[in-house]
């Protein structure tokens, strides 16, 4: 069974109008009730005022002299009055159409207690509906009877009916205005929701460059602000995904390029050995070459794995205070033979007591990569390793007097697989300096290069002291 949908636009209008109708209904009932009570109370107070004047007249020495004047005045206002005794007999006026006084025992008790009896609406004891009051009067401090004044309520009813008509007209006009205002407000709210819905649809389709109008006026503005933040983060994530995808493609292209040469060499040697195309005296050389190329491929894989671990923060450093002399001597000893093959000399200049705060294994990896790079581009030269302390950092420098680097290439050497001199890059993949950059950053340090073509190269590393 299909669910019946009730649009939010109509829900808003229905809620607005239902609240207004209920509010108008309650207010109308209370207002009519108040006006009704007020009108009858006003009439009763008017009758009491005349009654007090009549009783004052009755208490004079000659009571009946001026009562006829009251009869004329009150008849002009459609008010009748009678004076009655304790037996409910009418004493004044003697002749008239006023019905006999028929008060209940409870009503007589009120008069006998010297209080005024007020009946706002009576529909049984008179020919028409009236409001009447009955007030006691005394002779020689003894209850002599009472004065009853009555007035038809038709005038009051007509006034209330007219007031109700005016009230209904006012309510209808107010509802019409409220309906128009509700339509405008509902359309405003729904249009804001529709903008958000459209923006959501754009994001679901992969278009993250959306921006909703923000404001501090209400929750819609807060929602738009949060939505824009979400869209911005999605945009950043999407851009990062694109960058990673481009990096992946570039990585695959670079790795394929780097692996093609050694794989081709290995395949050629194996094919030559299998078909006896390599002479007996050259077989050992071919096998050694295949072994070297295999080791080269293994280094490529290991360096790439190491680079990715470092770049994705999967490497945890075990930092400690390391004696600078000890660290530099390890580098000198391990690369002594490799430097000697090129006719290079590795020298150390470390101030006594210099302490480097970092991970021993990773610092060795950093310096090994830099010094190997220096050996590769230096012939019959000197490679200097030095340290000195600054206020906040320990500075390590590796300087050579080799071939140097073109100024425009200095910023490129940190790129993965980049080689400044392809003709001299045998056995190297351009990953070493990329790993160096990542490891220095992981140490919260800085590294930069000073170099000129033919004037040598100087690597400067700054590592923060232990806090």
Image (cartoon, rainbow, N blue to C red):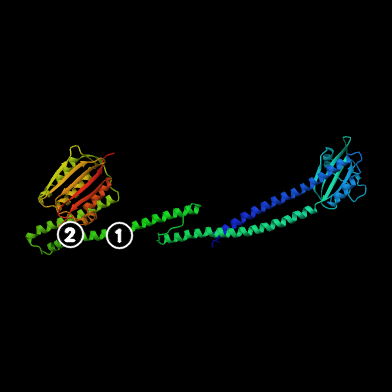
Q: Tell me where residue 98 appears, x and y as whole percent.
A: 89, 49
Label 1 sits on residue: 246
- List x then y, in percent, for residue 111: 84, 40
Quadrant in the picture for residue 21? bottom right
Q: How crowded is the residue under tag 1: few (<14 C-alpha within 10 Å), some, or many (20+)?
A: few
The residue tagged with tag 2: helix, strand or loop? helix
Quarter the C terminus occupies? top left
For label 1, the SS is: helix
**Residue shown at 88% from the left, 44% from the top:** 83
Snapshot quadrant of residue 109: top right
Query: Residue 352, percent across and down?
Result: 18, 37
Q: Are marks 2 and 1 in contact (CB under 8 Å)?
A: no
Who's the residue at 73% across and 50% down the image? 35
Q: Residue furthest left?
A: 281
In the rendered image, residue 143, in percent from the top left (x then y), is placed at 87, 37
Q: Nearer the viewer, residue 225 or 123?
A: 225
Find the residue positioned furthest to the right. Answer: 94
């Amino acid at each position: 069974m299909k669910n019946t949908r009730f649009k939010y636009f109509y829900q808003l209008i229905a809620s607005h109008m239902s609240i207004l109708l209920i509010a108008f209904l309650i207010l109308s009932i209370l207002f009519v009730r108040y006006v009704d009570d007020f009108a009858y109370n006003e009439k009763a107070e008017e009758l009491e005022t005349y009654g007090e004047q009549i009783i004052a007249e009755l208490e004079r020495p000659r009571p009946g002299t001026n009562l006829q004047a009251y009869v004329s005045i009150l008849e002009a206002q459609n008010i009748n009055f009678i004076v009655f005794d304790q037996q409910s007999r009418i004493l004044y006026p003697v002749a008239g159409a006023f019905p006999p006084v028929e008060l209940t025992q409870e009503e007589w008790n009120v008069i006998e207690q010297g209080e005024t009896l007020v009946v706002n609406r009576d529909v049984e004891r008179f020919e028409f509906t009236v409001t009447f009051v009955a007030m006691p009067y005394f002779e020689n401090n003894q209850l002599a009877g009472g004065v009853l004044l009555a007035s038809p309520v038709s005038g009051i009813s007509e006034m209330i009916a007219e007031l109700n008509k005016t009230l209904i007209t006012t309510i209808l006009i107010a509802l019409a205005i409220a309906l128009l205002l509700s339509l405008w407000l509902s359309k405003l709210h729904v249009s804001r929701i529709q903008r958000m819905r459209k923006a959501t649809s754009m994001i679901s389709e992969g278009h993250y460059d959306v921006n909703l109008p923000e404001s501090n006026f209400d929750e819609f503005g807060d929602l738009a602000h949060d939505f824009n933040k979400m869209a911005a983060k999605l945009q950043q994530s999407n851009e990062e995904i694109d960058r990673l995808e481009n990096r992946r493609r570039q990585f695959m292209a670079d790795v394929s390029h780097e692996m093609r040469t050694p794989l081709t060499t290995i395949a050629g040697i194996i094919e030559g050995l299998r078909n006896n195309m390599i002479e007996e005296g050259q077989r050992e050389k071919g096998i050694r070459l295949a072994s070297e190329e295999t080791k080269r491929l293994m280094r490529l894989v290991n360096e790439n794995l190491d680079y990715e671990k470092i770049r994705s923060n999967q490497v945890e450093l075990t930092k400690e205070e390391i004696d600078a002399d000890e660290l530099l001597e390890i580098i000198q000893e391990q690369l002594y033979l490799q430097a000697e093959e090129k006719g290079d000399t590795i020298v150390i200049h470390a101030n006594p007591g210099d302490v480097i705060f970092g991970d021993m294994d990773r610092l060795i990896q950093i310096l090994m990569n830099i010094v190997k790079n220096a050996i590769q581009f230096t012939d019959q030269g000197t490679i200097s390793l030095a340290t000195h302390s600054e206020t906040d950092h320990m500075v390590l420098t590796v300087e050579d007097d080799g071939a140097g680097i073109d100024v425009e290439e200095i910023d490129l050497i940190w790129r993965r697989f980049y080689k400044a001199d392809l003709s001299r890059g045998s056995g190297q993949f351009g990953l070493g300096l990329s790993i160096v950059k990542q490891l220095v950053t992981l140490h919260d340090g800085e590294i930069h290069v000073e170099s000129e073509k033919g004037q040598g190269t100087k690597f400067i590393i700054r590592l923060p002291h232990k806090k």
